[in-house]
Amino acid sequence: MTSDRTSDRTTDGTPVLPVALVGMGKMGRAIDALAIERRCEVVARLGADEMDSMTREALGGARVAIEFTRPEAALSNARTLLALGCPIVVGTTGWTAHLADLEAAVRETGTPALWAPNFSVGVQLFLAFAEDAARRLREVDGFDTHVVETHHTAKKDAPSGTGIAIAERLAAGLGHQVPVSSVRVGSVPGTHEVIFDAPFEQIKLVHEARDRRVFADGALTAARWLSRQTTPALYTMRDVLRATPST
C-alpha cells in the first residue's frame, strides 16, 4: 500500500478529489496516470490482499475508492469499503450474479456505490443506439441479430460485462434473446460489434476502444460524480450521464 497527498486544489483553483485505488493492474495504473489531469489525487494504492485488514485511516483521506481487481474479490472489497463509509466505484466485471448483494450492502451501510461493466461514454451511447436499432428492426422480417465482443487474452470473463449489457439492451428492443460470441486475442482493449444479418445485406454497429485511458477517464468521472451523491443507492454510468455538468 502507498499513500501520498500534495494539495487540495489544482493550479486553476479547482478542488481536487482524493481517491483510493483498489487493484494496481492495467486499469489501476491507467487511472493512476490520468488522475491529476482529471482533478483527482490518488492518496492510497491498495492491493486486493490488503483489504481484509483495511481501516479508514489506511485510505489516506480518500472520499471515493475505485476498484478494479478480480471477479472473486470484487464483492468482498466493496463490502469492506462501504462498511468503512467510503463510497466505491466498482469496475470489475464477471460477477454480475452478485449485484443484488452489493445493493444490499449499500442499504445496510447507507453508503453509495456505482458499478458499470464499461466506463466509456461512447459505449453508453452505443448501448442506446443498439436498443433503438433493435426496436426499429423488431417489425422487419429477415434480420438475425448477434453480438461479437473482442478483448485481450488476459481478460477472464466471457462474455464480457459489456457484451452482456449490449445483449440485454438488444433483447429489450427485439423481444427475444440474442447470442454473444467472445474472442480473446492479442492486447485488444475492447471491441464490440452488433450485427443485424439478412440474406442479401448486413448492418453493423461497432464500438472500438483505442486506448485503455477511455475507461480510466470514465471511472474518474464516475468517482467525482459519486462523491457528490448523498442518497445511498447503487448507481450506474447512465445516472452519471443523465446529470448536468453543474450537478
Image: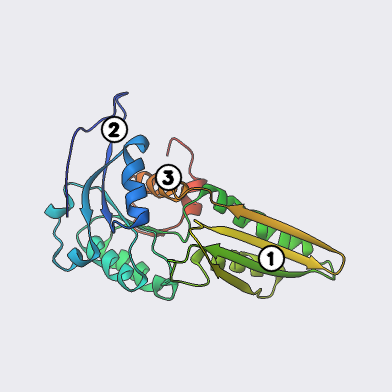
- Farthest-out residue, front: 186
Q: Amino acid at mark 3?
A: Asp
Q: Amino acid at mark 1?
A: Gly
Q: Nearer the viewer, residue 39 or 128?
A: 39
The mark nearer the N terminus, 1 or 2, is: 2
Residue beneath the point at 68% across and 75% down: 176
Residue beneath the point at 46% across and 36% down: 245
Q: Nearer the viewer, residue 76 or 217?
A: 217
Q: Which element type, helix, strand or loop, lies under badge 2? A: loop
Q: Quadrant of the C terminus?
A: top left
Q: Quadrant of the N terminus?
A: bottom left
Query: Is 225 positioned to the left or the right of 15 in the image?
Result: right
Q: Residue 89, image x and y in percent? A: 35, 56
Q: Is residue 31 above or below residue 191?
A: above
Q: Nearer the viewer, residue 207 or 118?
A: 207
The answer to whether the residues at label 1 and label 3 have Cβ atoms under 8 Å apart is: no
The mark nearer the N terminus, 2 or 3, is: 2
Structural distance between the alpha carbons of marks 1 and 3? 29 Å
Residue marked by disc 1: 173
Residue marked by disc 2: 15
Q: Residue 84, image x and y in percent? A: 19, 60
Residue marked by disc 3: 217
Which marked residue is nearer to the observer: mark 2 or mark 3? 3
Q: Which element type, helix, strand or loop, lies under badge 1? A: helix
